[in-house]
Image (cartoon, grey):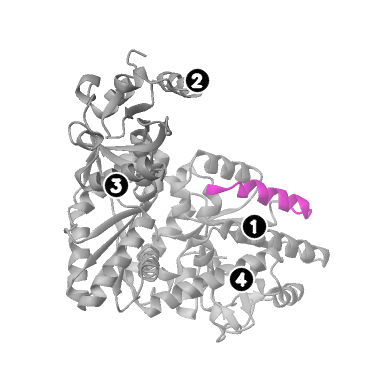
Amino acid sequence: MQTSVVGPSASMGLPASDQRFRELLESLPRVAVQGYDSQRRVIYWNEASERLYGFSEQEARGRCLEALLIPDEMADIVVDAHHAWVNHGTQIPASELELKHKSGAPVPVFSHHVMLGERSDNPLMFCIDIDLAGERKVQRELDYMTRFDPLTELPNRQTFETELENMLGECQRHGDTLMVLFLDIDHFTEINDTQGYEMGDLVIRSVASRLQGFQRSQDLLSRFGGDEFVMAMPRLDYESDALSVVQRIREDFQRPFQIEGRELLLRLSIGVSLYPENGNDAPELVRNADVAKHRAKQAGRDGYQFFNQEVRDAMLHQHHLAGRLQTLLSEDGGGELFLHFQPQVAARSERIESVEALMRWHAPEGPIPPTDFIKVAERTNLIERLGDWVIRQACRQQAEWHAMGIKGYRIDINISGRQAINSDVFQRLEACVAEYGLTPRDIGIELTENVLIDADVKVRDSLRALHDRGYKIAIDDFGTGYSSMSYLKMLPVTALKIDRSFVIECAQEPKDRAIMEATVFLGHRLGLEVVAEGVENIQQLELLREMRCDLIQGYYFYKPMAAADIQRLLSGGNNPPHPGAHRPSSDPTSASNGCH
């Protein structure tokens, strides 16, 4: 320690304990220590004080503390506290203070006061200050991290909802409206998966920057996490202005982003809620905008949806279905999930050749259409469990029929895109077939052409392995995709299924007939079997016979039937039915083939 106690203290005969205290002070180079007399004049100033406050020892010595360190607004308080300490023994409590630097800048410290020789005529006082600037900086950084998104520097969800509550208070006082936009980048996970997380971060920053271009001074933009952004915009002239903002954002996102030398086209799904119509507090408005955004995604992405009660009711219904479906799958169907089977008959002989397994949900309140619960399963990641349940039920049913002597009728199972791409469904299929003592001739699979087009190497290899072992593989809904048909020569399919959308109006629509004829011709030239779905009348049947279509599936012959009805039909010798004998009933689940 280069400095020492100077002035009156040097000649004071301090007790040994006080001398040791002084030595202790001099051994703490990182602690700012100032000694002063009863008149508050500095008589000791260590190097740490010089570093902390900017005054040298020579500058500080002999000057009053309030002239050096104390902000003007605190000066009277400090003088009074010092007077009470010296004259009445009222201790100055240790506390956090904001003193000042020589430059005038604030200096946050934890300050503690000690008096030596308090019984003497000239006591010596020490102020011991610990610099809190580093701690305050860390605290500010922690506070920033808890309130703002580090990637975009936008307010996070917690900050947004707090600020939104304040904005709503202002809107309520002044009778203003407010719009909440919930924005989600479409297919963002594909960017992370294919181009890496660094590119994903750059995309997030770029989207944040572009959205800030729509932000007025009174607006609030937040990143909630992932690829979700939320904006609050007060004082809009209700829905017309809100729609204008949404449309301008969507138009601006037609411009490609230039990121790291790459051109990216990004699209948004947007949900909108309005105050006070759609909610009176921040959580409700955000929640309803999120619900609307989910509906926009379900409608095909790259769109927007304004919240209304119908939207909320639909989402609640879907959540209810998802919860019940999850429970039923845990209970092996729970007595509500069943497979129905629709026969596929030979166009000429009208004999049943195979059946397609179709899923049905018979809830206590009435049948739930497959179009409803299949979509829910896909959106909630239940589709793989649902698909596995269908595979097991179909194999179990086929084994039961075999035990009754009913053999030679293949059961075809639909495999969804999510199943095919994200799981080892084909391995589980083969394991289930083996478990029930079946062969590849007993179970077939159907996949849509979009699944086959998107299939990766693993999926293609699995399909080839199934084909080589004798499984029948059909392309369902053929002709409804938008792509090259080159995959037909690369993938091991055995059948094409003409989608019912072409069959329905084929008697009146020449273009539909042309597509059907081309499909039959193409399939036969490639050595594939051709099946027509949705055949409902004799005119359709006769046209398909003229085209030499192989198999017919539809209400003209049979609607989807319960296992017991199919069992009676097949055990009765498989005689050709009387046309129209199995026309559709009013059961809404029989309105279409469905997905499973």
Q: Is residue 55 left or right of residue 190?
A: left
Q: So how many labels did they put on this image? A: 4
On the question of residue 459 being in view, the answer is yes
SS class of the residue under badge 1?
helix
Identify residue for label 2.
16
The residue shown at (62%, 79%) is 363
Q: CA distance from mark 2 to mark 3?
A: 31 Å
**Residue 341 lies in what quarter of the image?**
bottom right
The disc labelled 4 sits on which kind of residue?
Arg
On the image, numbered disc 1 is attached to which residue?
Answer: 388
* First in residue order: circle 4 vs circle 1: 4
Residue wearing tag 4: 324
Q: Earlier in the sequence, mark 1 or mark 3?
A: 3
Q: Under tag 3, what secondary structure?
A: helix
The location of residue 387, given as percent across then percent down, is 61, 59
**2 vs 1, front mark:** 2
Whether label 4 touches label 1, CB < 8 Å: no
Q: Would you say the residues marked 4 and 3 are in contact, meaning their CB atoms lie under 8 Å apart?
A: no
The secondary structure making up most of the magenta span is: helix
Single out the mark in the foreground, 4 or 1. 4
Q: CA distance from mark 4 to mark 3?
A: 73 Å
**What residue type is disc 1 on?**
Asp
Q: Is residue 344 visible?
A: no
Extent of the magenta region: 422-438
Of the two numbered discs 4 and 3 in the rendering, the one whose residue sits closer to the viewer: 3
Q: Earlier in the sequence, mark 2 or mark 1?
A: 2
Q: Quadrant of the C terminus?
A: bottom right
Secondary structure beneath label 4: helix
Q: On residue 80, which mark appears? A: 3
